[in-house]
Amino acid sequence: MARQTVRLRQIKSHWPLYLLLLPALGLIATFMYLPAATGILHSFYRWDGDELATYIGADNFTKAFTDPTIRHAFAVVGILFVANLFKMIPSIITAVVIHRVISDKARYVYRLLFVVPMVIPGMVVLLIWKFFYNPVVGLLNSFLTATHLLDLFVKANAWLVNVHLADKAIFMADRSPAWLGDSSLVIPALIFWGFPWIGIIGVLIYLSGLEKIPKSVYECADLDGVGWFRKFVYIELPLIATQVRINLVLLIIGVLSDYGLMLVLLDSSGGPGGAAMVPGLYMYYNAFMKREAGYACAIGILLFFIILALTFINNKFVRVEK
Amino acid sequence: MSRTSESPLARWLKHGYLWIMLALVFLPFYVMLVVSFKDNKQFSNHPWAPTWPLHWENWIVGWNTVGVCIANSIFIAVLTTVITLCVAVLAAYVFGRYKVPFADLLWAAILVLMLMPGVANLIPLFNLMRGLHLLNSLVGLCIVSAAGGQIVCLYILRNFIEDMPKEFFECARIDGASHLQQIIHVVIPQCGGIISTLAILNFVGAWNSFILPLIAIRDPEKLPLAVGLYQLQGAYVKQWGPLMAAYFISAVPLVVLFAFTMRFFIRGISEGAIKG
């Protein structure tokens, strides 16, 4: 439907429209633009988050560019981002498998069942995973011991040390690995987190894309003897490409800005030796632990521009043919 | 999709895969339920299998610890959702129906916020809330959450309102309906499906919000669920049974919500995905 154009000189009779916009715009101006503006301002100050503020020019930014912790934090985010790309796969596979189930009723029931875990609060999921990773009573270590996978890890680790591919033994016999307490195990633990990595919102969105495929396309493919894998690559994947791309954008923003995961599973200093320090967490740490709010603001602004640039690149180069 | 032929092997593979995935996805439920009935001795002897006698008193302890947080979270989630949707529907109506002067500029100013990570302005926001005396206030927390949450709602609702037939609005206007009446009698009934889906998503989002309440709420009796549980796990490391019972109880409100809205929700997500 074409929108009705209101010209500037008609505004006299249409001014109530602005009244309807007022609550939305007022909230955005007060709680998003105003803090953003003061944040930019304060990034040029040495500021303790309270009254004390001294103007120091661009020192916070030069400090950020030379800070080894920040470099490390972006490296961690890079690793997590690549890992999260792979963690998108189970959702896609699950959506395709549900879509290929023949009975209408079974398809509906599967969908319903996969939605049910959404009732668990996010915090509980995190705390349960923390419990799984617990070195003494955790499910993961019990599982690894019971299946003797741990012995395998120990042997593989020893072999790697022998051939000088690894420099130290992470897994040792008769010692249960502390997944969240060992600086070399923290990143793998953060990657493995959430297994089997099925995000139900993602699955539902993919399914809605898949359902647009006409039956005749499959019939043609069957006649031509197209196998299940080629059907996936040539029929199903192109149809969910748009949704995959949207999820990719959300993923970039999510990975770069999220740090609740690290805060809950580890602590505000990014776990043992700061191994899992990410930019968002470093900002939080600077603001509320070290009381260097000015520096924290500078990190936040840096993050914003990086996300902006990545989204722009994604929109420009990751084109989806329709 | 339904096809005529399917080999039994393919059939078993598909269902087998889905059942294994479901088992893994439901594993946390099992762990919570089983452990919540144990005392610590039972837990250290047989951590993963059910044991008798069942310790029902764990659930009472669990309820006593998270009951207040649940009440707070329900209040926060309901109020945040209501504010978010009211504000978003009003603005989406204007953006979807009219091209007022500066509309494009304002729209761009709103959309760019979708890219702004919440973390970037957390500290100034904290200061602003302190200045406005919104710290340690549940209503303040709801207003600030709604300011951020409305953006996505606005974006999706605008698409839906733009696609509505013009005649609906014209008829209403001929009958003398004001803007507000058009919103109440035309927009809300016509977009009911997507509005309720957005309501559920906002509710779940507010239910799970963690960082903002963590810094904004100080009083223990005002803590929402996520923060309450986060602080509980530090204090109760030794008592796994009551802790797991508390975790399980904290899932109950959403069970109730989803029990009534599941069909809606699944359909709404699919519709929203196509249009948004």
Image (cartoon, coloured by chain):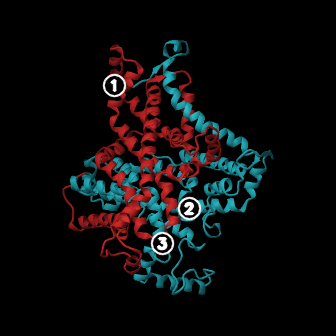
Q: Quadrant of the C terminus of chain B?
A: top left
Name the residue that disc number 3 marks. B238
Q: Chain of mark 1?
A: B
Task: Give the structural element (helix, strand or loop) at label 1.
Answer: helix
Q: Which residue is mark 1?
A: B185
Q: Residue at x 42, y 34 (%)?
A: B157
Q: Nearer the viewer, mark 1 or mark 3?
A: 3
Looking at the rendered structure, the kind of residue marked 2 is Met
> Chain A: what color?
cyan
Please state which of residues A245 and B185 is positioned toward the viewer in this rendering: B185
- Amino acid bearing label 1: His
Q: CA distance from mark 1 to mark 2?
A: 46 Å
Foreground of the two, B79 or A279: B79
Of badges 2 and 3, nearer the viewer stands 3
Q: Chain of mark 3?
A: B
CA distance separating discs 1 and 3? 56 Å
